[in-house]
Image (cartoon, grey):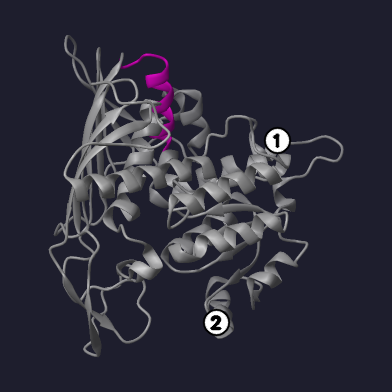
């Protein structure tokens, strides 16, 4: 890929010419704004739930404008691309309007509430020819980009066994609350949709093989929670005594066994109620000649396992990584790159196509088609847990037995 700050020639746009707007300025939306600035994109403005809240957030973030509506964003000729970081139930309609207005779009996951809706967005994106991305940013830790190429080049041999977890504790207490607990806004899956899809997208990306069948067990340990009267931001530690009792039906934890298209097997454990685990994502990929493992709490280190030689630990180092890993890295070795940096790396990849005016033939970022696949995968997980048996992922080849 050509670095986006090296596009030149008559009539060619530069990154500094591109204007963006961001819908939603909660935890993730704020990261979008900050990382866009870091890579040199002009943030024209933001959109919030009310004009008053938007004005306050625009002032706090140092953004020039708070748009009164999505229509106002779409009418602004200086906006080329819109970032959708609103609650899940708004994604489809907002993304549909953005594409229909001729603007590129980056949407937070999940892309939709149902696979039928995500399929419609895939079709519309293809029809418009516009850049469309789902922000599976965890792909863009530099070592993940490196491992993707390492596996594709045969560095681990044939991938055989993919295991790991994604654990958090921010919903451990019955007084913890988020809009993600509301099925009308978040959908019928929670831990799987919120964190599980990151792990599943990442490992299928690394292995280069889709999951084609699942066997899942999900359960809910906290069936009643206490919703504060008033807005609550994700990961807030504020406790309110003025609450409303709510029944909860979505899963706190999930255990999922996996079958990949190439015959590899896997398993993942997901939880949002694991005390002390703030944001722990781990994976291990065991191949026929070597293994690799990674932990989000030490993101600059990659463990490499061997049978007949000493194991290794590769510290993220642009000079020692595959080309994609070097491209994702923004800092020299020894200068840790973390969660926020992955957004910048992902956006650099997306905006290279925005500058070009169209999606690359094989984009390195997750597209709406990838987001649709994750919707199909999530629905298979839900069905498997309900039926208590293996379920094939629609549209994928039958799992090798």
Q: Is residue 373 above or below residue 57?
A: above
Which residue is painted at 65% across and 31% down in the image? 2
Can residue 179 be spotted in the picture?
yes
In the foreground, 330 or 359: 359
Q: Is residue 142 magenta?
A: yes
Residues shaded magenta: 141-156
Whether residue 42 can be seen here:
no
Outermost residue, bottom direction?
242
Q: Nearer the viewer, residue 293 or 382?
A: 382
Q: Give the distance between the C-alpha atoms of the residues marked 2 and 1, in whole angstroms.
A: 39 Å
Residue neighbourhood size for the residue with mark 2, other residues' Cα within 10 Å, grouped as few (<14), some (14–19), many (≥20):
few
- In the figure, is residue 258 to the left or right of 317? left
Q: Is residue 347 above or below residue 189?
A: above
Q: Nearer the viewer, residue 387 or 12?
A: 387
Question: Picture coordinates of residue 84 (x, y %)?
Answer: 54, 60
Any magenta on residue 206?
Answer: no
Secondary structure type for disc 1: helix
- Tag 1 or tag 2, which sits nearer the N-term? 1
The residue labelled by disc 2 is 50
Q: Main secondary structure of the magenta part?
A: helix
Query: Which quadrant: the C terminus?
Result: top left
Compared to residue 197, the image places residue 304 above or below, namely above
Q: Position of residue 108 (x, y in %)?
A: 47, 55
Under tag 2, what secondary structure? loop
Residue 380 horizontal side relative to residue 131, left or right: left
> Is the residue marked by circle 1 packed among few (<14), some (14-19), or many (20+) residues within 10 Å?
few
Report the quarter where the N terminus lies: top right
Report x, y in % for residue 129. 69, 42
Residue depicted at 16% across the width and 70% down the height: 223
Mark 1 lies on residue? 6
At a point 23% along the width and 27% down the height, the residue shown is: 265
């Amino acid at each position: 890929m050509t670095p986006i700050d090296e596009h030149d020639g008559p009539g060619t746009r530069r990154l500094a010419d591109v204007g963006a707007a961001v819908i939603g300025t909660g935890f993730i939306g704020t990261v979008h704004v900050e990382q866009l600035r870091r890579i040199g994109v002009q943030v024209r403005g933001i959109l919030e739930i009310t004009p008053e809240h938007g004005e306050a957030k625009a002032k706090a973030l140092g953004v020039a404008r708070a748009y009164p509506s999505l229509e106002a964003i779409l009418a602004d000729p200086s906006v080329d691309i819109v970032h959708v970081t609103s609650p899940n139930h708004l994604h489809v309609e907002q993304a549909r309007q953005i594409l229909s207005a001729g603007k590129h779009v980056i949407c937070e996951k999940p892309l939709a509430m149902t696979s039928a809706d995500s399929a419609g967005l895939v079709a519309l994106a293809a029809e418009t020819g516009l850049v469309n991305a789902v922000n599976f940013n965890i792909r863009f830790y530099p070592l993940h980009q490196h491992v993707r190429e390492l596996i594709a080049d045969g560095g681990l041999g044939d991938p055989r066994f993919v295991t790991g977890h994604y654990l958090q504790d921010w919903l451990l207490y019955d007084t913890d609350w988020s809009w993600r607990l509301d099925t009308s806004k978040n959908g019928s899956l929670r831990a799987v949709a919120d964190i599980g899809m990151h792990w599943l997208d990442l490992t299928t990306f690394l292995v280069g093989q889709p999951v084609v069948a699942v066997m899942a067990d999900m359960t809910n340990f906290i069936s009643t929670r206490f919703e504060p009267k008033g807005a609550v931001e994700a990961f807030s530690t504020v406790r309110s005594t003025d609450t409303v009792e709510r029944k909860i039906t979505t899963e706190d934890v999930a255990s999922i066994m996996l079958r990949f298209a190439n015959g590899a097997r896997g398993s993942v454990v997901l939880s949002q109620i694991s005390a002390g685990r703030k944001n722990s994502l781990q994976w291990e990929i065991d191949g026929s000649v070597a293994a690799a493992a990674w932990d989000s709490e030490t993101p600059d280190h990659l463990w490499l396992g061997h049978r007949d030689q000493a194991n290794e630990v590769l510290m993220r180092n642009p000079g020692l990584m595959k080309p994609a890993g070097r491209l994702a890295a923004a800092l020299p070795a020894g200068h840790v790159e973390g969660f926020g940096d992955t957004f910048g790396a992902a956006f650099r990849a997306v905006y290279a196509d925005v500058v070009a005016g169209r999606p690359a033939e094989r984009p390195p970022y997750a597209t709406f088609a990838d987001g649709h696949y994750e919707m199909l995968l999530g629905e298979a997980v839900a069905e498997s847990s309900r039926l208590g048996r293996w379920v094939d992922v629609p549209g994928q080849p039958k799992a090798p037995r």
